[in-house]
Amino acid sequence: MSFGIVATLGKLAAWLTVLLATAPIMLWVERRGSALIQDRRGPNRVGPLGLFQGLADAVKFLFKEDIVPAGADRPLYLLAPILALVPALTTFVVIPFGPVVEVGGRAVNLIVAGVDTGVLLLLALASLGVYSLVMAGYSSNNKYSLLGAVRASAQMISYELALTLSVVAVLIPVGSFRLDEVVAAQQGTWFGFVPQWNVAPQIVGFIVFLVAAFAETNRLPFDLPEAESELVAGYHTEYSSMKFALFFMGEYMSMATLSALAATLYFGGWHLPGIDYSGPWAWVALKGLTVLVAKIAVFMLFFVWVRWSFPRFRFDQLMRLGWKVLLPLAIFNLVAIAALTVAGVL
Amino acid sequence: MESYLPILVFCVIAAGFLVVSLLAARLLRHRGSGRTSREPYECGNEAESFAHDHRFSIRYYLIAVLFVIFDVETIFLFPWAVMFDKLALFGFIEMVVFLFILIVGYVYVWNRGALNWA
């Protein structure tokens, strides 16, 4: 095998290890976190502090009976959970997790696919997620599922506009779709210790991005597609066993995708001032990956914190916020950033 | 195109992992359910109608049409943003004109009440 293939497979393996560990860890964090906020104990029987709860749940999912409702569209019913997870996992190929390192005399860029379309590809893949929800709701032959799917599609496409516009604003001063160049543009410091992260000049865009990210991932306070008090479980009401588990993982994966995108666009990605990114390549790669995963973890914790702190919006409030507040705000931010760039401030 | 190959590889690996886990569940899982548990869940009583017999609000359709219009405009902004340093002031003015036309349409849609849900 050639050197390039080995390097690429190595980078793929690094990401897959991190991503596949995310779901069981987040399951524990979410349940212990909700218990903490609600003054309960949470899962504490499987392993120390209930840490192995995720493994126990995975085993349980494997042995559960699989029910396909009568009248369901079987191919679509099977395809939906797979489509929920594959694009969300694949988005990580364009997220850089370290600088260009030298391995045995050859330069290796620590990004799985260093393509020029970078962030555009990521947004395209992330927006495929809505198809899986629509397929799941349509194929289940269940009224709650169908309503959940219709709501999910309306909500996700509405907030996608604001999300995309806030991302465009980040790209203007950088002048590239490549996320490694976005990271490179944020490596300086102000006054020697304040990192030059995009979050400072792009604060309006970041807030728009963050709110839209909650809607895109169907998390509280925007979890209307699976509002349990009215729609039972929304689009995955009929799903059971491993297929349900895949939807479950898919939700955490899309949270991880948007967290990684937020960390890379607004918080310097794998780079942290004060850390020395020189030395053996494996050590550099490990440092880059650790910093990035730490930043992703902060966002994921924020998702959990918000979920257990806020009540759910009504659907008309959700649509009003998306179309009448976030969209104008995102356009305003875009024009302001463009003007500042023309004036030479950014 | 070679740099795009890892994306396909990642897709195949991810899909392969999911198919393996679904197959494992198929081999291991508990079987043997009666007819009633295959009915679509509604409330516990027998369902009166199928999901596809029902209609839902036209507003969802309207939102989808509006999305298509605005999303095409957004896609148009991407190449502009990346070429911004070369287009400089000319590009900025052009885009302000473009956005102005977009905003006129947006204000029209708002005034017609298409963005009101209730």
Image: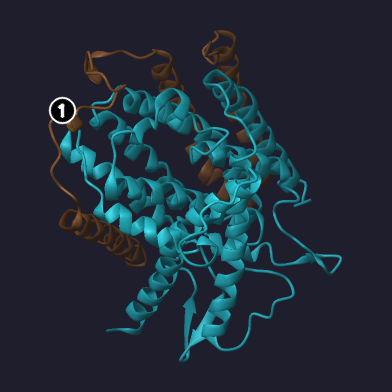
Chain colours: A cyan, B brown
Q: Is residue A301 left or right of residue A102?
A: right
Q: Residue at x 21, y 60 (%)?
A: B24
- Counting from the top left corner in percent of width and height, residue A193 is at 82, 68
Q: Is residue A7 above or below residue B56?
A: below
Q: Is residue A30 left or right of residue A157?
A: right
**A231 displayed left or right of B28:** right
Question: Which amino acid, by three-letter code, is at mark 1?
Answer: Gly
* Residue A330 visible in image: yes
Question: Residue furthest toward the bottom?
Answer: A104
- Hey, which quadrant is residue A134 in on the image? top left
Residue that lies at the very extreme toward the top in this rendered image: B112
Where in the figure is residue A314, as x and y percent of width and height? 55, 21
Where is residue A9? Give x, y as percent.
35, 74
Give the residue at x 44% y 46%.
A251
Q: Which residue occupies the extreme front position in the image? A: A45
Q: Is residue A211 above or below residue A106?
A: above
Q: Quadrant of the N terminus of chain A?
A: bottom left
- Please name the residue that numbered disc 1 is placed on: A71
Chain letter, disc 1 residue: A
Tell me residue B89's x, y (percent).
Answer: 69, 42
Query: Which is more toward the observer, B55 or A57?
Result: A57
| Position above or below: B49 against A188 | above
Closer to us: A78 or B1: A78
Q: Does dot 1 land on a helix, a strand or a loop?
A: loop
> How many tags in the picture?
1
Is residue A171 something one can see in this rendering? no
* Label 1: how many Cα within 10 Å (few below 14, some 14–19, many 20+): some
The residue located at (25%, 31%) in the rendering is A140
In the visual, does B74 lie left or right of A136?
right
Q: Quadrant of residue A69?
A: top left
Task: Indicate whether A116 appears above or below B33.
Answer: below
